């Protein structure tokens, strides 16, 4: 799963997506700087390198427009959303597939889905097998009571966000786990804010049975 972005990094990524959609090529470093009132081209380059390090873009530092978006659908109506399963023994989240969603549902660039065991999500109104759609969010943009997907101790988990005595706290819905402070160096990372639950009530048939086969079965 790509690393979460700061507020300005996400704004720059959204600008890259919108610019490419309108022009079929990427903005130059100087154009990015003018858009966000960043005077130094070195600072812009550092932001782009951070986006590359976090897995959102590839870049060629020798070229002014040497940026390639990774895993971002440029369709004006839909967006391809990565779906992640629970982390394995090595702590890495597993890509479980992709969904193509209406942009009005998926929200901004970087939206993703996760599926977690029923025991982890039932207290939040979800069920085992539900897909939780999350949008990227900076910690200072979280509201009271927001349900977030967080990385805690190398695993993904759901928590509610509250502010206590001036600090951001991620609290579980049950007493099985302790609260966690959201502060620099704590190892606690908010990956996204849950905005929707996608529930499949029936698994579609893989393929329709040919008419000849249906007639054969009916005669048995």
Image: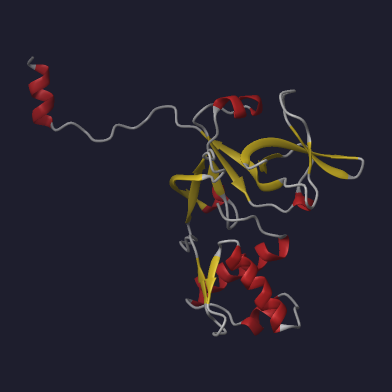
Residue 158: image location, x then y, percent:
66, 36
> Which scheme is used to colour this image of the protein?
secondary structure
Residue 171, quarter of the rendered image: top right
Residue at image coords 76%, 83% = 39
Residue sitting farthest toward the right: 165
Q: Nearer the viewer, residue 104 or 184?
A: 184
Q: Nearer the viewer, residue 100 or 91?
A: 91
Residue 48: image location, x then y, percent:
63, 72
Residue 27: image location, x then y, percent:
58, 79
Query: How many numbered marks are there?
Result: 0
- Is residue 34 something one can see in this rendering? no
Residue 40 placement, left or right of 85:
right
Q: Nearer the viewer, residue 2 or 34?
A: 2
Residue sitting farthest toward the front: 90
Residue at image coords 62%, 55% = 3
Residue 109: image location, x then y, percent:
58, 58
Q: Nearer the viewer, residue 9 or 17?
A: 9
Q: Is residue 182 above or below residue 64?
A: above
Q: Quadrant of the C terminus?
A: top left
Residue 45, quarter of the rendered image: bottom right
């Amino acid at each position: 799963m790509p690393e979460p972005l700061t507020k300005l990094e996400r704004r720059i990524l959204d600008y890259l997506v919108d610019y490419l959609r309108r022009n079929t090529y990427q903005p130059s470093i100087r154009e990015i700087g003018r858009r966000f009132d960043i005077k130094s081209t070195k600072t812009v380059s550092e932001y782009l390198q951070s986006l590359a390090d976090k897995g959102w873009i590839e870049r060629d530092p020798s070229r002014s427009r040497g940026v390639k978006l990774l895993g971002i659908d440029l369709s004006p109506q839909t967006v391809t959303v990565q779906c992640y399963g629970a982390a394995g023994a090595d702590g890495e989240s597993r890509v479980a597939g992709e969904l193509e969603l209406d942009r009005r549902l998926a929200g901004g660039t970087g939206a993703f889905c996760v599926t977690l065991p029923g025991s982890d999500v039932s207290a939040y109104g979800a069920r085992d097998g539900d897909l939780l759609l999350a949008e990227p969010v900076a910690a200072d943009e979280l509201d009271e009571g927001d349900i977030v997907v967080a990385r805690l101790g190398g695993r993904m988990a759901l928590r509610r966000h509250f502010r206590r005595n001036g600090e951001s706290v991620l609290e579980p819905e049950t007493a099985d786990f302790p609260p966690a402070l959201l502060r620099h160096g704590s190892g606690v990372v908010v990956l996204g804010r849950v905005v929707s639950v996608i529930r499949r009530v029936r698994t579609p048939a893989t393929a329709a049975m040919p008419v000849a086969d249906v007639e054969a079965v009916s005669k048995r």
